[in-house]
Amino acid sequence: MAGHSQFKNIMHRKGKQDAQRAKIFTKLIREITTAARLGSADPGSNPRLRAATIAARDANMTRDTIDRAIKRGSSAEADANYDEVRYEGYGPGGVAVIVEALTNNRNRTAGEVRSIFTKHGGNLGESNSVSFMFDRLGEFRFPLSVGSADQVLEKAIDAGADDVASGDGADGIHEIVCAQGEFNTVREALEKSLGQPASAKLVWRARTGAPVEGEIAETMLDMIAALEDNDDVQNVYANFEMSDETLAKFAA
């Protein structure tokens, strides 16, 4: 019985991993399709598409799958027309939340996002109801292998970036940020000096944080997980602050 139970546990975990991988692929395919539809089908001349294909390769998506997604977008197939929408509101504890989505059914997505907010004690607001609490920035992520913190800082400054944060350890990265209006200029300069970034996109970064702990923190994390689990949702940004102990507790 023990062996049987262990096997079932392994299969359950594998099933969850496969489901998570499928959701990631769904989101990446939508981004690739939309990028190809809105711009060139050539990643070399379409920065958004190039960033999406890099992310897809990092997620171990096959070349054939990427190519099919590009073809769907560039051929303007009916089922490849996704609208970019943004939702804003407050989560538990007064945490400001921004949700970015790609959808072919605005009413469905709005209803699902609103339901998630309500279920977790939050409220979906009007457009621009919380975005004033965030800055819109360009964000570039490079592996530590591209150079030391000082080397990357120097090249980032030369490229016109505003700030650099370099991590350490096996999962560390160099994170470079710039003003939204300088995104393309900085991207081109960084690609020449550091190579292709692991990630290059516009993000929302909170100006101030809202501290949450205990049950509110757990509910907030559950809400974000539910939003990210939705196929239409591409990105979720929130201004909560939690202690390392709290994060470790709920990550366990």
Image (spheres, helix red, strand yellow):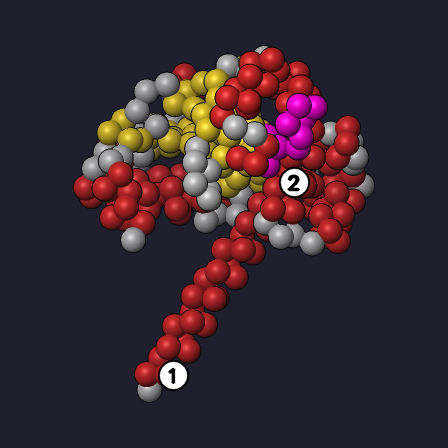
How many badges with numbers are in the image?
2
**Horizontal and vertical percent position of residue 131:** 42, 21
Kindly identify which residue carries mark 1.
4
Amino acid found under the numbered disc labelled 1 = His
Q: Is residue 142 visible?
A: yes
Left of 247 or right of it: where is 141? right
Circle 2: is it few (<14), some (14-19), or many (20+) Cα within 10 Å? Answer: some
Residue shown at the point (29%, 31%) measured from the top left: 241
Based on the displayed image, in which of its 4 quarters is residue 140 positioned? Answer: top right
Of residues 180 and 75, the one nearer the viewer is 180
- Residue 60 is inside the magenta segment: no
Q: Is residue 110 visible?
A: no
Residue shown at the point (79%, 35%) measured from the top left: 42
Kindly identify which residue carries mark 2.
54
Marks 2/1: CA–CA distance: 40 Å
Of residues 100 and 119, the one nearer the viewer is 100
Label 1 residue SS? helix
Circle 1: is it few (<14), some (14-19), or many (20+) Cα within 10 Å? Answer: few
**Horizontal and vertical percent position of residue 94:** 27, 29
Q: Which residues are magenta?
A: 191-200
Label 2 residue SS? helix
